[in-house]
Image: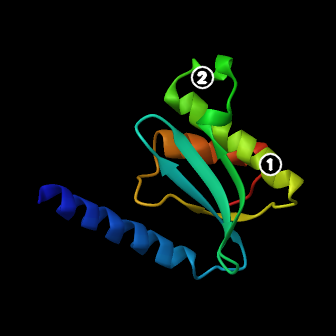
Amino acid sequence: MAFHKYKNIKEKRKLRVRKSLLKRLERYRLSVFRSNKYCYAQIIDDWKKVTLVAASEKDLSENDQKKTKTERANLVGESLAKKAEKQKIKKVVFDRGAYNYHGRVKALAEGARKGGLQF
């Protein structure tokens, strides 16, 4: 029972964040998902409901896999920015989902900024 209550709270928080982002539909949305093991990011076109660019820690090389989770999240942000640059995407809206903006989520955002994306 407690898990269902937590899941409901998390869904409400995610929708509350997304509601404020969807007011600016002229930009694509950079969505972040963080599991215990990996970190994923994708750029989504909400008009067409299509994922344009995606990156995850699974795409990193074996040397990068030995780094800490925060460093790997930073590398995921950089690789996503490089892929977005090939698609000619410069400006996005950062969707942190139900996660707080610190730790791996913040590192991913900083890596994306360092790679050339503008929030």
Disc 1 and disc 2 in contact, CB within 8 angstroms: no
Which residue is at a point 54% across and 53% down the rendered structure image?
A: 32
Residue 12 percent across, percent down from the top left: 33, 71
Q: Nearer the viewer, residue 117 or 55?
A: 55
Identify the amino acid type marked 2.
Gln
Q: In the rendered image, which residue does mark 1 sit on?
A: 83
Taking the image as shown, residue 18 lies to the left or right of residue 79, namely left
Quadrant occupied by the C terminus: bottom right
Q: Camera-side residue: 46 or 102?
A: 46
- Dividing the picture into quadrants, the one containing residue 77 is top right
* Rendered-image quadrant of the N terminus: bottom left
CA–CA distance in space, label 1 to label 2: 20 Å
Quarter location, residue 102: top left
Image coordinates for residue 41, horizontal then vertical, percent: 61, 51
Residue drawn at the location 82% of the way across and 61% of the way down:
89
**Can residue 31 be seen?**
yes
**Residue bearing the label numbered 2:** 65
Is residue 28 left or right of 8 when viewed as pictured? right
**Local SS, label 1:** helix
